[in-house]
Image: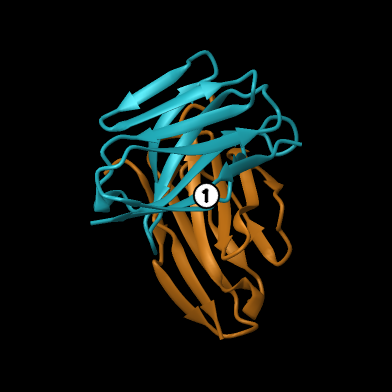
Amino acid sequence: KQEVTQIPAALSVPEGENLVLNCSFTDSAIYNLQWFRQDPGKGLTSLLLIQSSQREQTSGRLNASLDKSSGRSTLYIAASQPGDSATYLCAVPSYGGSQGNLIFGKGTKLSVKP
Amino acid sequence: DAGITQSPRYKITETGRQVTLMCHQTWSHSYMFWYRQDLGHGLRLIYYSAAADITDKGEVPDGYVVSRSKTENFPLTLESATRSQTSVYFCASGPESLDGYTFGSGTRLTVV
């Protein structure tokens, strides 16, 4: 059964710092991995999708990497800003059982201080 | 507008009442899902659907009913609401290729 873990659970950094959020998964046979952002009281916004054949994806100040063999993904945020404060979730789709269901980590709550 | 729409955004209901949460997507995605999000539990799958007329239980299906007569709609019904069903409910859709999922804005349900 696929399990997704995110470390740390919470992170507080001063504005301008570069930071890394970690995501690990137990079954390396994944289709893809998706990073989401959730603001308080809001829905989930997709940030980046990495296919299983890719090593990384970039969007603006965000860079996500994927190492299937070690069961890890990282989300790198460059030059953090207070507007980056949110909870970041990673997820992989399952197959077998609840086919297509996204298995989520519990998220990393990021706070960027001005 | 393309996307996924949930309604209502907020709902307060009484214990024992039947409540239906609506979800509509315009992507023609094969997969649709209902999650609930609670503090300490994260996102938990209630029901999912791989196509019209195909639905299946997720992790926490008790007390919920779904239907999917059309590809674009996936309503979730609480047959007899209980306080433990107070939560934020998210609908999501995804293509058959599993490449990229979209979430609705959520319905905050309070059962009093």
- Residue at x-position 67% and y-position 21%: A29
Is B82 placed above or below B9 here?
below
| Residue B71 seen anywhere in this rendered image of the structure | no
Q: SS at mark 1?
A: loop
- Give the class, few, some or many, for how many residues have Cα within 10 Å of label 1's Cα (few <14, many ≥20): many
Of the 4 image quadrants, the one containing the C terminus of chain B is bottom right
Q: Decide: is B60 above or below B93.
A: below
Displayed quadrant of residue A114:
bottom left
Rendering quarter of residue B42 = bottom right
Identify which residue is drawn at 52% across, 81% down. B13
Picture quadrant where residue A62 is located: top left
Q: Which chain is cyan?
A: A
Question: Residue B85 at what x, y percent from top left?
Answer: 62, 72
Task: Name the foreground residue: B13 vs A89.
Answer: A89
Q: Colour of chain B?
A: orange
Q: Chain of mark 1?
A: A
* Whether residue A60 is visible: yes
Q: Residue furthest top?
A: A53
Q: Which percent across, then down, holds residue A93?
A: 60, 33
The residue tagged 1 is A107
Provide residue A3's location: percent of width, then percent of height. 69, 39
Here the colouring is: by chain
- In-front residue for pair A93/A22: A22
Q: Please name whichever residue, B38 or A18, is drawn nearer the observer in this view of the structure.
A: A18
For image coordinates 50% across by 72% down, the residue present is: B109
Which residue does the image show at 48% across and 31% down from the upper left?
A: A74
Q: Quadrant of the N terminus of chain B?
A: top left
Residue A91 lies left or right of residue A42; in this view the side is right
How many labels were placed on the picture? Answer: 1
> Callout 1, which amino acid?
Gly
A47 left or right of B110 in image: left
